[in-house]
Image (spheres, coloured by chain):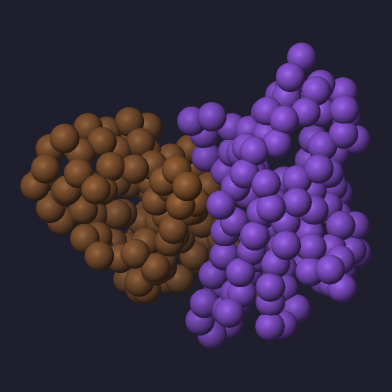
Amino acid sequence: AQSVTQLDSHVSVSEGTPVLLRCNYSSSYSPSLFWYVQHPNKGLQLLLKYTSAATLVKGINGFEAEFKKSETSFHLTKPSAHMSDAAEYFCVVTDVLNAGNNRKLIWGLGTSLAVNP
Amino acid sequence: DVKVTQSSRYLVKRTGEKVFLECVQDMDHENMFWYRQDPGLGLRLIYFSYDVKMKEKGDIPEGYSVSREKKERFSLILESASTNQTSMYLCASSTSTGANQPQHFGDGTRLSIL
């Protein structure tokens, strides 16, 4: 069975400093991995996805993530945090839901990112 | 852009009531999903549907049912609401074309059962 672990429940950074949100996964076969962001009282927005192409994936708002199979990791980074980045971030891995292309998403519990002025 | 619209942002109902949460997507997606989100528990899948009139149980279907009579609309039904169903409910949709399509979410319905 697949699983995903977000290693930090809360991360606090200063505006302008780098962001690192850590995610490890387990998978019995080649996974697809996603990062979603949720701003307060809003739904979830896709930041980026990895689907067995390039291991360094660029997403929206300056975020990127690197798939490292040897470390079973998919950490999310951003060179310089902005106040608007304060939100909840979720790492997600796919699992087989039923036949064909319908896949169940396995969700991490989220990392709350605070950005201090 | 994909638009997933949930009919209510906030809803307050009483114990024992039958509650309907509605979700509509405008991208002709085959798959639709209902989740609930609770602090410390993340997102948990309640039900999903991969075609009209088709439905499958997720991880926590007890106390819920769903209806998908049209491709664009997926309804979540609380048959007899209880206080432990107070939660944020999120609807999502995705296409079946390609194996790794992301899900697109609505803004959520915050449901309180009194």
At 17% from the left and 48% from the top, the residue drawn is B82
A10, A81: nearer the viewer: A10
The answer to whether residue B43 shows anywhere in this view is yes
Quarter of the image where one finds residue A108: bottom right
Q: Where is residue A104 in the image (x, y as percent from the top left)?
A: 54, 70
The answer to whether residue A59 shows anywhere in this view is no
Judged left or right of residue A94, residue B25 is: left
Q: Which residue lies furthest to the top in this view?
A: A117
Q: Where is residue B9 in the image (x, y as percent from the top left)?
A: 37, 32
Judged left or right of residue A91, residue A22 is: right
At 39% from the left and 51% from the top, the residue drawn is B36
B36, A20: nearer the viewer: A20
Quarter of the image where one finds residue A10: top right
At 52% from the left and 77% from the top, the residue drawn is A97
Say which colour chain B has.
brown
Give the total of numbered labels: 0
B79, A22: nearer the viewer: A22
At 62% from the left and 44% from the top, the residue drawn is A9
Q: Where is residue B109 in the image (x, y as percent from the top left)?
A: 37, 38
Against B56, residue B106 (above or below) is above
Q: Where is residue A102 in the image (x, y as percent from the top left)?
A: 55, 74
Say which colour chain A has.
purple
Q: Quadrant of the N terminus of chain B?
A: top right
Judged left or right of residue A67, residue B82 is: left
Q: Quadrant of the C terminus of chain B?
A: top left
